[in-house]
Amino acid sequence: MTCPLCHEEIDVAGAGYCASHQRAFENIKRAFSTWTVAYGSPRVPGFLEQVQKLPQTGLKAKEIASFLLENPSRWK
Ligand SMILES: [Zn+2]
């Protein structure tokens, strides 16, 4: 199995992404929980669009945010 973003081999069983995109995905999920506390219940697409615009968002996080916008079923 390969990472859907960078097509690198995934060596962790059950992981959906390579190690660096998996880490970015977990960071985004954690950031979303923080947002939920701060802003009520933001919608996931709106949140992902904001993440992409933030200057402090890293490249991997931007890649995963745009991937999740195109593939909402991957957000779980
Ligand atoms: Zn990757």
Image (tube, rainbow, N blue to C red):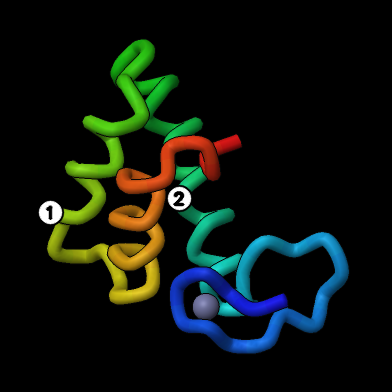
Q: Position of residue 39 (x, y in %)?
A: 29, 18
Kind of residue at badge 2 = Ile
Q: Residue at horizontal 38%, vertical 73%?
A: 60
Crowding at dot 1, Cα within 10 Å, few <14 / some 14-19 / many 20+, comes out as: few
Q: Residue at x 54, y 44 (%)?
A: 74
- Secondary structure beneath dot 2 equals helix
Q: State the quadrant of the C terminus.
A: top right
Mark 2: C-beta under 8 Å from nearest atom of ligand 1: no
Picture quarter containing residue 57?
Answer: bottom left
Quadrant containing the N terminus in the rendered view: bottom right
Q: In the displayed structure, would residue 30 be above or below residue 37?
A: below
- The residue that disc 2 covers is 28
- In the rendered view, would you say 59 is above or below 36? below
- Residue beneath disc 1: 53
Is disc 1 placed on a helix, strand or loop?
A: helix
- Say the numbered circle drawn on residue 41: none
* Residue located 46% across and 82% down the image: 6
Q: Nearer the viewer, residue 13 or 20?
A: 13
Q: Would you place residue 40 above or below residue 43 in this image? A: above
Q: Is residue 27 left or right of residue 35?
A: right
Q: Nearer the viewer, residue 41 or 18?
A: 18
Which percent across, then down, holds residue 65? 34, 54
* In the image: residue 4, left or right of residue 14: left
